[in-house]
Amino acid sequence: MPLYEYQCPDCDARFDRLIRSSDSAPKIICPTCGGERPERLLSMFATSGPRSASSSSSSASAPACGPVG
């Protein structure tokens, strides 16, 4: 089951839901305010696996955020 992240335009709350692939159009309701029109957000996804020595050494010298260059 995919995990989708939503944001309510009425109260600006963020929440996530597990959606079954068999559900054609599930009705999503904001758990904070009961708003019936939350927007699905584009989320980053994470993977797990072995890290190579080159990727761990290069990430240590790169800034955590901000412009690169």
Image (spheres, grey):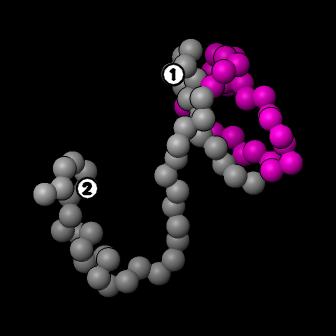
Marks 1 and 2 in Cβ contact (< 8 Å): no
Q: Quadrant of the C terminus?
A: bottom left
User: Which amino acid type is shown beneath numbered disc 2?
Assistant: Ala
Please identify the quarter of the rendering in which residue 36 is found.
top right
Q: Quadrant of the N terminus?
A: bottom right
In this picture, residue 58 sits left or right of residue 17? left
Residue range in magenta is 14-38
Secondary structure of the residue carrying tag 2 is loop
| Pointer 1 residue | 12
| Pointer 2 residue | 64
User: What's the residue at 18%, 56% (across, down)?
Assistant: 68
- Give me the C-alpha separation between circle 1 and circle 2: 26 Å
User: Which amino acid type is shown beneath numbered disc 1?
Assistant: Asp
Looking at the image, is 30 positioned above or below residue 15?
A: above
User: From this viewpoint, which residue is outermost toward the front?
Assistant: 24
Looking at the image, is 25 positioned above or below residue 53?
A: above
In this picture, residue 57 sits left or right of residue 69? right
Residue 28 position within the rendered picture, expressed as x and y whole percent measured from the top left: 73, 29
Looking at the image, is 61 positioned above or below residue 42?
A: below
Other residues around mark 1 within 10 Å, as few (<14) / some (14–19) / many (≥20): few
Other residues around mark 2 within 10 Å, as few (<14) / some (14–19) / many (≥20): few
Residue 44 position within the rendered picture, expressed as x and y whole percent measured from the top left: 49, 52
Dominant secondary structure of the magenta stretch? loop
Decide which of tag 1 and tag 2 comes sooner along the chain: 1
Residue 62 position within the rendered picture, expressed as x and y whole percent measured from the top left: 20, 64
